[in-house]
Image (spheres, rainbow, N blue to C red):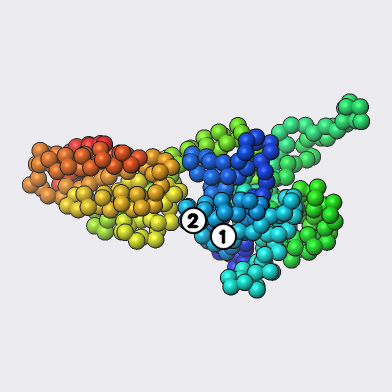
Amino acid sequence: MEPGPLLSGGASVAAVLPAGGSGERLGGATPKQFCAVLGRPLISYTVRALERINWISDIVVVVSLENIETMKSIIEKYCHKRITIVEGGLTRHRSIFNGLKIFLESKLSSCPLQKPEVVIIHDAVRPFVEEDILLKVVLAAKEHGAAGAVRPLVSTVVASSADGSLDHSLERARYRASEMPQAFIFDIIYEAYCQCSDYDLDYGTECLHLALKYCKTNAKLIEGPPDLWKVTYKRDLYAAESVIKDKLSQQVCVTTDMKEDSVQLGFLLHETLKNQVNQVKSISVFLCKNDHSLQSILGQCYNFICINDKRSHFQEIQELVDILEHASISVLHPVVLISVHFNVSENMSFSSGMEELAGIKEFAREVKKKNILVYGLLIRYEKKFWCMEAIWSR
């Protein structure tokens, strides 16, 4: 779904991430939003899921006072952009309210935030939110005033009597589990919070209910994907790690130099991956040191196929490895680099090509120590025929 037509007319969208919880149900001293998953704090994955969406103008992260410095260090270490940190309250609703107020109070600061037309509220411990569901709830909120993702109930809900006996059960088919993200016309949800009773602020958990109770806004419910689950217990951290590993294995970045043959092969490879391996995301970019397209995917992709002319292959490999090292992404996960090179000289023998590759094999052994796994494929191009001559690896 393309955002352009839906967010036309100058509509602005921002997000508020409540992240002030203590993580009591998780156990341990570290709040769950700051627990490491594959070496990276959980909240960093959630922030990254939002900041990669260019139509979200600002992301407000609400954390407890004692975790403000921790959040600042995360933003700095992982180069997060468009982030504003706000001190949270004692409860979830009070933290969200603080996050909303910053859009009005920041007018007095040196870096004021623009009050958005639509605001997204999303949990910091739901890292797998995708642009599609965010766009759906924003669109619905623009039309209805409020909207939220829901999922079918997994278990039947029952009510107990005072003595602990079954009182009644709910018809599961009629009910849904309220999930995140949710979106609201900013003025509606802000007004709802302004009118909130202390009881709602201290004991309530459902933002959609506040919009209905205080602003008579009946939210549109959007059926969400199964990836919206919330990290609550320790076992969920292991599940999150598994999902992240799976996502990493499904993304491939195809880079080419500026030569016609390389670009053509890169395009064919892109189409092959896209059409035959449905779960692999392929991105074609031209490799250069400051390429913005390449920089934008670092940290999202850990598998690279680099296609270039045989005459400049070693320099290209070194340049890409330098970029990967500078981005520090191999600190967290192994990076796989498959380098495909052309032999465009009809006079170069097989043995000569292998001699040149010997130096690169040594280079591959060295960068393996930095968690970068280099593999290579040499293709001899002769009279419009592709001929694979040799394969070298780390």
Q: Position of residue 65 (x, y in %)?
A: 65, 54
Instruction: Judge from the rendering whether residue 110 lies leftward or rightward of residue 329; answer left or right.
Output: right
Which one is closest to the eye, mark 1 or mark 2?
2
Mark linked to residue 83: 1
Nearer to the camera, 369 or 134: 369
For badge 2, the amino acid type reads Glu
Residue 129, can we see it?
yes
Q: Quadrant of residue 371?
A: top left
Question: What secondary structure is found at the residue carrying circle 2?
Answer: helix
Whether residue 121 is visible: no
Percent from the top left, x then y, of residue 239? Answer: 56, 34
Tell which circle, 1 or 2, labels the residue nearer the N-terminal end.
2
Residue 94: x percent and y percent?
75, 55
Q: In this rendering, is residue 338 above or below 82?
A: above
Quadrant that contains the N terminus = bottom right
- Residue shown at 91% from the left, 30% from the top: 161
The answer to whether residue 198 is left or right of residue 259 is right
Numbered tag placed on residue 385 in the rendering: none
> Which residue sits at x=32%, y=46%?
305
**Residue at the limit of the structure toward the front, as seen here:** 66
Instruction: Give the residue number, with chain letter if any, for mark 2.
Output: 76
Residue 3: x, y in percent?
Answer: 57, 60
The single residue placed furthest to the left in the displayed view is 347
